[in-house]
Amino acid sequence: MTTVDILLPHYGRMDLLQEAVASVLAQSDPGWRLTIVDDNGDRAEEALAAWCAALDDPRVVYLRNERNLGINRNFQRCVTLVENELAVIIGSDDLMLPGYVRCVREAYARRPDVAIVQPGVEVIDEHGQPSRGMVDLAKRWVYAPRVSEQVVLRGEELALSLVRGNWLYFPSLCWRADALKRTGFREGFSVVQDLALVLDLVLDGESLLVDPTTCFHYRRHSGSVSSAHAADGRRFAEERRFFVETAARLDDRGWPRAARAARRHTSSRINALTRMPGALRNRDGASVLVRHIVGR
């Protein structure tokens, strides 16, 4: 079975990154290689490089960008570093449960044709405790398919499902490397770059396998990039632009139901509405949210 390339784009807290790395080291299946790509630029801490070297594990590689590339370009650099047939781009504050690598390798052994595997995920907060926020409850009970065994999704049905509400947990996804490298991340997106990549692959005819086996902890906390961008409206300005572009592409593909859902982007507008109380302290941010909510 093939080795899984695990790419870890890092910018931020060293302690959370160390927890993420420890979760990779604890995998029951040793078929992985971890590459940490530090995007702190000249702010990078020598302590992190020394800590990685002290692990003394040839499967762990530490790389430092000479200058800060930003989210989109650092993620794209990670894509260029993939050498094996499978790849994961884990968040620097997320955790793999011990069976993660085994789960995704077995899934691809059974279905080598799929481009993406979404395993089961448990959401945790910044303290590592289970989290049951509104966003994740909506993902689980409203948007995500309810499955008790592996299911493969593709075509307009998959596109429609995702533009209604993105129920995927990007850092937990395992990718067929040739599909990931062929498509890559589109420039100009940061918060929504994950959904853009998935939809690019779906429009290209690729499929996604959902495996209900819970083997990943996704960390959601107020310090995330998406939360920061939501507060001043940048997130929703980006989402609005993305959904308008995507609706046109879905129309051209002959998928009218998915195009209508993208044009409405209802879940994104509802999310913006929930952010209004916090955004009222920022007049410009509040105006962006209002325009997004009313669909202007």
Image (cartoon, rainbow, N blue to C red):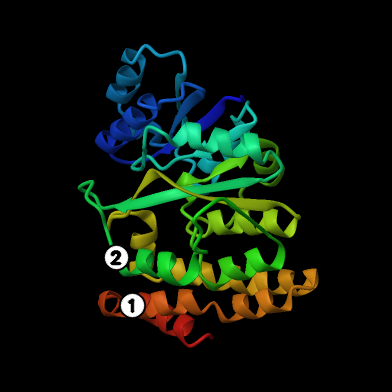
In the image: residue 93, left or right of residue 180:
left
In front: 183, or 233?
183
Percent across and percent down for residue 283 are 32, 80
Q: Is residue 277 above or below residue 92?
A: below
Q: Which residue is mark 2?
A: 133
Q: Which residue is mark 1?
A: 274
In the image: residue 71, left or right of residue 205:
left
In front: 195, or 42?
195
The answer to whether residue 186 of the structure is visible from this angle is no
- Label 1 to label 2: alpha-carbon separation: 12 Å
Question: The residue under label 1 is which amino acid type?
Answer: Thr
**Pointer 2 local density, CA inside 10 Å: few below 14, some 14–19, many at least 20:** few
Q: Is residue 152 above or below residue 175?
A: below
**Number of marks:** 2
Q: Quadrant of residue 38?
A: top left
Q: Is residue 17 above or below residue 281?
A: above
Percent across and percent down for residue 137 are 36, 67
SS of the residue under disc 2: loop
| Residue drawn at (56%, 33%) of the image | 105
In front: 77, or 90?
90
Percent across and percent down for residue 91 are 41, 43
Q: Check whether the beta carbons of the residues at disc 1 and disc 2 lie within 8 A of each other.
A: no
| Residue drawn at (65%, 42%) of the image | 180
Q: Is residue 10 above or below residue 281?
A: above
